[in-house]
């Protein structure tokens, strides 16, 4: 059975409480949760309001 992921945003959330920014995954595609690994780049061509599924 394929796992369904519903993404919330196309880009990661930046948190700056220290010297270097920390990027939190918002697309839910990162394999390094809760941190961004750049997987959101696959969503750049997606239309807003349309549901996409990733395995």
Image (cartoon, rainbow, N blue to C red):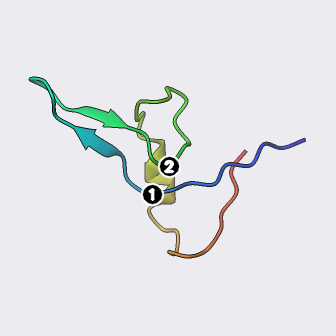
Mark 1 highlights which residue? 9
Answer with mark 1 or mark 2, whichever residue precedes in sequence. Answer: 1
- Kind of element beneath mark 2: loop
- Kind of element beneath mark 1: loop
Question: From this viewpoint, which residue is outermost toward the left?
Answer: 19
Q: Are marks 1 and 2 in contact (CB under 8 Å)?
A: yes
The residue drawn where x is 50% and y is 74% is 48
Give the answer, above or below, for where 1 lies relative to 9: above
The residue drawn where x is 55% and y is 29% is 31
Residue 49 rendering spot, x and y as whole percentages:
56, 76
Residue 32 rendering spot, x and y as whole percentages:
49, 26
- Front-lying residue, 44 or 24: 24
The residue drawn where x is 50% and y is 58% is 43
- Front-lying residue, 49 or 44: 49
Q: Quadrant of the C terminus?
A: top right
Q: CA distance from mark 1 to mark 2?
A: 5 Å
């Amino acid at each position: 059975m394929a796992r369904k992921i519903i993404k919330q945003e196309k880009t990661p959330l930046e948190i700056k409480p220290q010297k270097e920014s920390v990027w939190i995954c918002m697309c839910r595609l990162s394999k390094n949760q809760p941190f961004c690994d750049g997987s959101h780049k696959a969503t750049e061509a997606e239309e807003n309001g349309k549901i996409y599924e990733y395995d």
